[in-house]
Amino acid sequence: MRALQSSSRETTPSLPVAMGLAEACSGRAPAWLVRALSTISMMWPLVVMARLCIFLALGDPAIGRWLLGDTLSVGAFLTVQFCLDMAIIVVPRVGSFQRLAPHIQLRWLVPFIFASASVYALLCSSVFAVAGSAASLLFAVVMPSVVAVSIFGAQRILGFVYCAATLSPFLFEMPDTLPLAVPVAGLAGLLLAAIMQVRADQDNLQHRQDNVMRGEQALELLTDFEEAGQGWFWETDRSGRVTYVSETLVARIGKTTQELLGQPFLALIGQDPSGKATEEQRTIGFHLSARTAFADLAVRAASQEECWWSLSGRPVVSEFGQFLGFRGSVADLTAMRKSQAEVARLARFDSLTGLANRVQMQAMLEQALGGSSGHQGDCTLFLLDLDRFKAVNDTMGHPVGDALLRQVAQRLTRAVGNVATVGRLGGDEFQIILPAIVDRGELAKLAERIIHGVSQPYVIEGTQVVIGVSVGIAVAPFDGIDRDTLTRNADLALYEAKDAGRGIWRFYAKEMHADAEDRRRLEQDLRHAISTGGLHVEYQPVVTTATEKISGFETLVRWTHPERGPISPSLFIPIAEEAGLISQIGEWVLRTACLDAVHWPEDTRVAVNVSPIQFANPIFPTLVMHTLAKSGISPDRLELEITEGVFLSEGTNTEAMFAQLKALGVRLALDDFGTGYSALHYLRTAPFDKIKIDQSFVRGAAIKGSRNGAIVKAIVSLAEALQMETTAEGAETIDELELIRSLGCSHVQGFVYGRPVANEVVMANFAEQGVYAEASGFKTSREKRRTMFRSIKLLHGANSYDARIRNISTGGAMVEGLADVPAGTVFQIAFSANFMVEARCRWSSGDRMGMEFAEPIELEQVNSEAPIKEVVSTGIRHRAA
């Protein structure tokens, strides 16, 4: 017991040393200490087993003598030994102990390890004193040292503590016969521990060097990341004050690092001009006070220029769970914000003209209809469609078209001023919203002003361009109380305006719905007629002018409605084009015409109209080839009549299409020349065989004073220069036929040689009359007359007669009121006191006679003069009856 107490006194001063070592070790990585303590807890049962093996190795007689020596002391030592070992095994596994800082855990555990080793050594000393075996003593001392080093060798403090505690009792109470055995054994254990520690230190040094290299590389990468402007970093202390901020971040907000260090982190965030905390500041302040992480919070920076950041941060805690502050990153959102703003602007405004786009106009119309108080508001909607814009866009190019649209937008904006909003729906369609304006008089004046302004000439790239505009007007709440209804009705009004001749405006009327419904029913009936064979074709002869031989027939499609009777092609063909039925109709007409023409005389051609939609179809040449092959007709007998509209179809390769059709051997004719958007380069580039002169230039060409004859002559001369044939359409009278023949047209087509008839009639006429045609009809043409019922005075010499005009033209009139007037009688016709015309009687029947004016008159002048009340002639006043 004395020895045991002495040993205890001698080992006590070593505790501060162990505590100091543990304190020095606490600066290492916490993970290293945690692994060391975990190793102790897991491996200490092996230490206990090793001790048990040592006792067993001493032999039963020695243990027996030792146990009989002092039972009370032995029991106390064993109890202490057991408690210490259990503490070393159990305590590191307790949750509350694990939550302590690693170096605090080490401070608590080192004394237990030291005490356990010392108790074990004292027990061994007592046993050896009884047994007196030097070999057993050496074995008992070396074995614990080896076990300790093997378990705790990598942890220098724990291994040395255990070895020192094991050796210390023997250094003071070992037998004299073994003065060197114990130190040698201890030194051997320490040497082994040192060797293992050197290896561990080398590994740690290499690990630290690798960490340093990785740290330097990471620092370079972070520096490059910051300098590239992709992101920056910041850090605060426990109180939320800035302790670190990237220099590039400081430069972005125009301050210095010294000015920001120590400042509250919220000072980096822009403030409200009123001085109140912004929503962003309140959000960041909440996270800082609650010590919760946040990510990608968009805030405006406290800088002179507009600068937006995306802030992310997380709380930083020490290895002991203590809150140290916040650490986070900043990403620049300025460019993205500007891009988003631009995207948002483009989502609401037209990129070409800068006007509001369709989406924005719909929202504004909803707002205008809703009114300021949420009740139904008054407003007017204008829908505008540019006339002839597509021709400009296609012939002069899209850049010119875009420039034209920008100028149109400027004129519309000036025309409406600040009383309305102008928007572009797309293409050449515009929309105008006029809130709280429903006065139809003011709206009509505005529409007139818009049409006049848009119709003025434009100068684009040195070229003058002229277009027009049509306007449809719908007024809320009379024409609709919701957006869709008002828009639909304005669209109906626009359709009516374009159908009435373009360049005009129309208010919506309920009758327009009936017209739209009628077109819808006609479309349905047309679809049914196509599927059931309700269409048929008729043929009108084309006659050679010089010989009056029938050179061919033009194919005309006809539709006889079961309820409405014959439907004009001018009505159902546009419907077919809008409904996408024209290609189906065109294919059927082409196939039917070729099958009919194959039975005609060999040199008789058949002409078929081709719509621009058909012409734009890439498979159209293949369709023509199959039709020719199936019918057996010669390709040169088929003549395809193509309008100038094919040159205006977007995306159509006209040159390639013309080349493929000419390769088949068919003939090509330019139909309705002189109307639409005529351009001479069509004739220069397209391989036409014939030019068809539109009937608008033929009819009335024989009337005195008409310029149509000169136009026809110019077209004929042009065709002859290009070695093309000409066909004059619409000839109805003998004098028109004679004029056409004298002007040199090679072919003529019109009622003068026959109306369109079915193929059965064509075959019958061939059988009866052969291939020659005979002209018939009125001998002379007369101008279009206007029906009128107006009182006039007829002055003849000193006489004045009351009369009335029934119809009138620029060259004459039919007058009633005088009976049996001799032909050739000359009168003065007094339309008013200021407007008189000399006229001669051409014929007389009953109280009616035909009058021919000595000089053509302007009908507008007749309409503008007030009806005559009294006329003065030869000094005598005559009053109207």
Image: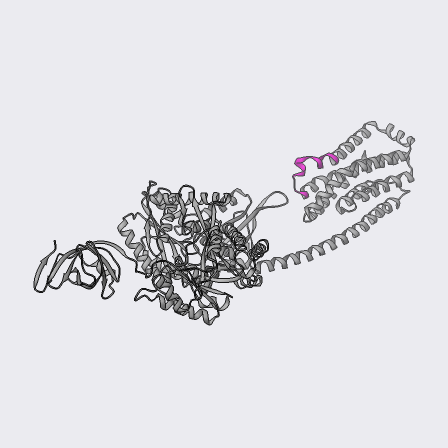
Q: Can you name the residue that lies furthest to the left here?
A: 876
Left or right position of 157 against 447: right
**In this view of the protein, which residue sits in the foreground, 406 or 396?**
396
Left or right position of 341 against 76: left
Q: Which residues are magenta?
A: 89-102
Q: Position of residue 121 (x, y in %)?
A: 82, 38
- Looking at the image, residue 505 lies above or below residue 861: above
The residue at 54%/43% (across/down) is 291
- Looking at the image, residue 382 lies above or below residue 118: below
> Is 471 contained in the magenta span?
no
The residue at 45%/61% (across/down) is 543
Q: Is residue 402 visible?
A: no
**In this view of the protein, which residue sits in the foreground, 38 or 11?**
38
Q: Position of residue 126 (x, y in %)?
A: 85, 35
Quarter-wise, where is residue 377 in the image?
top left
Quarter-wise, where is residue 80 in the image?
top right
**In this view of the protein, which residue sits in the foreground, 209 or 41?**
209
**In this view of the protein, which residue sits in the foreground, 600 or 46?**
600
Classified by dominant secondary structure, the portion drawn in magenta counts as: helix
Total numbered labels: 0
Q: Is residue 4 visible?
A: yes
